[in-house]
C-alpha cells in the first residue's frame, strides 16, 4: 500500500472536484445547477491555482454541455462534467448519444428532487430515470467514496468505452463537510494511465463522418454496447481491488455488511447505507440478525453477484429513496426481477423511504426490519413517512 | 459522539458557524461531519446546520434527532418541531435579550441565553452574531480548545478579523461565567 495522501476537510462535492482534478481531465464542459455547482466552482478554482490544466467550456445549457463532452471525448481526450436533477433531464437525449458513441465520459450527478414541485432535497429518481441510457452508474455513500469512485469510474469507463456516472445525494453527501484522504498525484498517476484510445477523431483531418446505419449494423452496435456493459462488471471489480491495494480503501460492487446468517437483509443505495450500518449494529447488539447489502454499482446491475449473496436469505427489505409512479421503488423492482427464478428466492419487501429527502433514522430502519420479519411481503412498494416507524 | 444543531436564518452565518466548528474539531484530530439543510437558499429563511464529532469515522447520514447542544441564532425560530428530541441533558444556547427563565417555550430545558447582538455591535460587527455565539458554545462545551478556535476564526473570517476575534472572546468568557448556573 502506498501511503501518500493528505487528510482534508471537504464536502462531498469538493471531494468529487479533487477526484476529477487528480484524473487530469483535458476538457470540462459544465453548466451550473444546485446542488452540483460547488463541484464546478472548486474545479475552476483549482484551475485558477494552476493545479488543473484543462479547457473549461461553459455552454448555454446542459444539453449543449453533454454535446460538448461527447465531441471532446471522441477526439481521444479525458472529459469530466457534473450536473443534477433537471440538468440531467435536459441532457437525457445526449446521454443515449454518449453511450452509443462509446464516449467514456465521467460525470458526477448530485441527486436532487425533480420538478414539479420545486425542491432541493436528496432523491435518487433523477439518475435512476437514466438507467436505460447505457451509462455505468455508481452510487456513493460518502465524500471519500465519491472521490475514490471518480477515479475508479475512469478506469472502468475507458477500458470498456462506456460513459460512467458517479452519483451522490444532495446535502447528506454533497454538502456534508467531512474528513477526506486526498491521494497524491503520484499515486493516482500510477493507478490511472492517460486515456489513449485506439480510435479517435482527429480534428486536423478535415473530413466529416456520418453515422447513419442500416438495421443490421444498428443491431450489432447495440449488442456490442451490451457486451461492453457485461464486461464492465469484471473491469469495475478489478478497478476497485487495485484501488484497495494502493490506498487500503475498497468498496466492492455489492458490499455485504454483517450479512452472516441474516434473517433480514436490507438492500439500498447511497447515503441511507451509512445510517443502515448503524441500524444493523444496533439490531445485532439487540439480538436481531440484520445485515446490509449495499448496491454500489447499479448499472450494469450485478445480478449473478446479488443472487449469490442472497442464497439462503429468507427476507430482503429494499429501501428506495426514489419513486417510479405506477410501479413503486426502482431498486425494489430490480431486486424482485433479479431473484426471480432463484431456488428458494427470498421474500422481497419494498419500502419508499426518504422520498423527497425525508429523514431516515436508524430507529425507522429498525422498525421496518421488525415489520419485515412479522409480515408477508406486499407485491407493491410501501410508502413510509418519518413517523411511520414508531 | 457529540452532536450539535445550529438554527438560524439565511444570511446569519449558521452554516459558516458549523464550518468553523468542524474545522476546529478536525484540527484536534476528530472525525467530523457537518451539513446544512435550507429551503429557499435565500436570506431570512430558516437554515439548520448539523455537526457530528467522533473519534471514529461517522457513518450516520440523517438528521440529528437527539442533540447534545443546540445553538439558536434567533429565538423567534423556536417551535415545537425544533424542540422535539431535546432532553434535559441538552444544552440550549439562545441568542436573545431575554433571560433564560423568560423563554417560556423552553421551560424545563437547560437553557442559556446570550445577548449576541449587543456584544457583536459593541465589537463593531453590527448584527453579525456568529463569532459571539461560537465563543459562547465553545465556552459552554469546553471544546474545541479556545486557542484553536481563535485561530480558525482568524483564518475563516472574510472581513473584520480583529472584531470577530474579540467577539468570539467575549462570547467565550461570558459562557465561562454562566456555566453551571442553570
Image: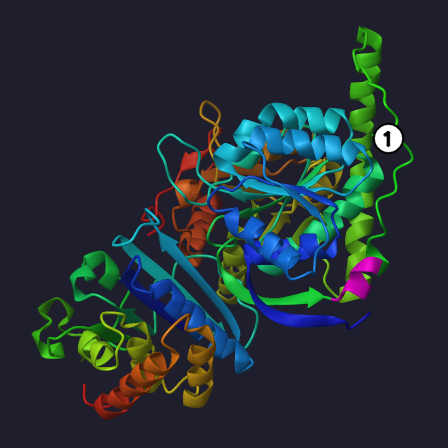
Locate residue B13 relative to residue A78 in the image: left or right. left
Residue drawn at point x = 34 percent, y = 74 percent: B68
In which quadrant of the rendered view does residue A291 lie?
bottom right
Front position in the image: A135 or A263:
A135
What span is colored magenta in the figure? Answer: A184-189
Residue B90 picture location, percent across and down: 28, 75
The residue at the point 31 percent across, 59 percent down is B11
Q: Position of residue A45 (x, y in %)?
A: 59, 57
Q: Is residue B18 visible?
A: yes
Q: Which residue is mark 1?
A: A204
User: Vertically, is A82 above or below A50?
Assistant: above
Residue at the image position 46 percent from the left and 83 percent from the top:
B151
Type of secondary structure dominating the magenta stretch: helix
Q: Is residue A329 left or right of residue A54?
A: left
What is the tally of numbered marks visible in this picture?
1
- Quadrant showing the N terminus of chain A: bottom right
Question: Residue furthest toward the right?
Answer: A198
Q: Is residue A257 visible?
A: no
A374 or A204, which lies in front?
A204
The verdict on residue A10 being magenta is no
Amino acid at each position: 500500500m502506498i501511503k501518500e495522501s493528505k487528510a482534508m476537510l471537504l464536502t462531498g462535492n469538493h471531494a468529487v472536484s479533487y477526484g476529477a482534478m487528480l484524473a487530469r481531465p483535458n476538457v470540462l464542459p459544465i453548466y451550473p445547477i444546485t446542488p452540483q455547482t460547488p463541484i464546478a466552482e472548486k474545479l475552476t478554482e483549482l484551475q485558477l491555482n494552476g493545479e488543473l490544466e484543462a479547457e473549461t467550456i461553459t455552454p448555454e445549457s446542459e444539453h449543449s454541455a453533454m454535446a460538448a463532452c461527447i465531441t471532446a471525448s471522441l477526439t481521444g481526450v479525458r472529459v469530466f462534467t457534473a450536473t443534477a436533477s433537471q440538468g440531467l433531464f435536459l441532457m437525457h437525449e445526449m446521454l443515449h448519444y454518449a453511450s452509443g458513441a462509446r464516449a467514456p465520459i465521467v460525470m458526477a450527478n448530485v441527486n436532487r428532487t425533480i420538478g414539479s414541485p420545486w425542491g432541493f432535497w436528496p432523491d435518487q429518481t433523477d439518475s435512476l430515470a437514466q438507467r436505460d441510457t447505457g451509462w455505468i452508474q455508481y452510487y456513493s455513500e460518502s465524500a471519500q467514496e465519491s472521490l475514490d469512485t471518480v477515479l475508479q469510474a475512469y478506469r472502468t469507463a475507458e477500458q470498456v468505452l462506456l460513459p460512467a456516472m458517479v452519483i451522490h445525494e444532495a446535502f447528506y453527501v454533497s454538502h456534508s463537510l467531512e474528513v477526506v484522504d486526498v491521494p497524491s498525484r503520484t499515486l493516482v498517476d500510477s493507478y490511472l494511465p492517460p486515456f489513449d484510445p485506439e480510435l479517435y477523431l482527429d480534428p486536423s483531418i478535415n473530413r466529416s463522418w456520418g453515422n447513419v446505419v442500416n438495421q443490421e449494423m444498428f443491431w450489432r452496435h447495440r449488442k456490442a454496447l451490451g457486451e461492453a456493459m457485461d464486461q464492465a462488471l469484471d473491469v469495475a471489480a478489478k478497478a476497485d481491488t487495485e484501488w484497495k491495494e494502493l490506498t487500503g480503501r475498497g468498496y466492492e460492487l455489492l458490499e455485504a455488511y454483517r450479512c452472516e446468517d441474516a434473517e433480514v437483509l436490507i438492500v439500498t443505495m447511497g447515503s441511507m447505507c451509512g445510517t443502515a450500518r448503524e441500524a444493523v449494529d444496533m439490531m445485532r447488539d439487540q439480538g436481531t440478525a440484520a445485515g446490509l447489502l449495499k448496491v454500489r454499482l447499479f448499472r450494469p446491475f450485478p445480478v449473478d453477484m446479488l443472487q449469490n449473496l442472497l442464497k439462503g436469505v429468507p427476507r430482503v427489505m429494499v429501501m428506495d429513496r426514489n419513486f417510479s409512479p405506477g410501479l413503486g421503488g426502482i431498486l425494489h423492482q430490480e431486486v424482485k426481477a433479479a431473484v426471480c427464478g432463484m431456488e428458494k428466492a427470498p421474500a422481497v419487501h419494498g419500502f419508499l423511504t426518504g422520498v423527497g429527502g425525508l429523514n431516515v433514522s436508524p430507529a425507522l430502519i429498525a422498525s421496518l426490519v421488525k415489520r419485515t420479519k412479522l409480515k408477508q411481503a406486499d407485491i407493491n412498494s410501501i410508502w413510509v413517512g418519518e413517523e411511520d416507524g414508531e | 459522539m457529540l452532536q450539535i444543531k445550529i438554527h438560524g436564518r439565511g444570511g446569519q452565518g449558521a452554516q459558516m458557524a458549523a464550518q468553523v466548528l468542524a474545522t476546529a474539531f478536525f484540527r484536534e484530530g476528530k472525525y467530523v461531519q457537518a451539513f446544512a439543510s435550507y429551503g429557499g437558499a435565500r436570506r431570512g429563511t430558516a437554515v439548520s446546520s448539523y455537526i457530528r464529532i467522533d473519534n471514529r469515522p461517522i457513518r450516520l447520514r440523517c438528521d440529528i434527532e437527539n442533540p447534545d447542544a443546540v445553538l439558536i441564532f434567533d429565538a423567534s425560530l423556536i417551535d415545537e418541531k425544533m424542540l422535539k428530541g431535546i432532553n434535559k441533558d441538552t444544552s440550549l444556547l439562545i441568542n436573545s435579550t431575554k433571560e433564560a427563565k423568560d423563554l417560556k417555550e423552553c421551560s424545563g430545558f437547560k437553557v442559556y441565553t446570550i445577548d449576541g447582538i449587543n456584544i457583536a455591535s459593541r465589537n463593531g460587527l453590527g448584527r453579525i452574531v456568529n463569532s459571539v455565539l461560537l465563543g459562547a458554545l465553545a465556552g459552554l462545551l469546553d471544546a474545541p480548545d479556545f486557542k484553536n478556535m481563535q485561530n480558525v476564526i482568524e483564518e475563516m473570517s472574510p472581513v473584520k478579523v480583529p472584531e470577530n476575534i474579540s467577539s468570539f472572546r467575549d462570547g467565550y468568557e461570558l459562557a465561562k461565567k454562566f456555566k453551571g448556573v442553570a
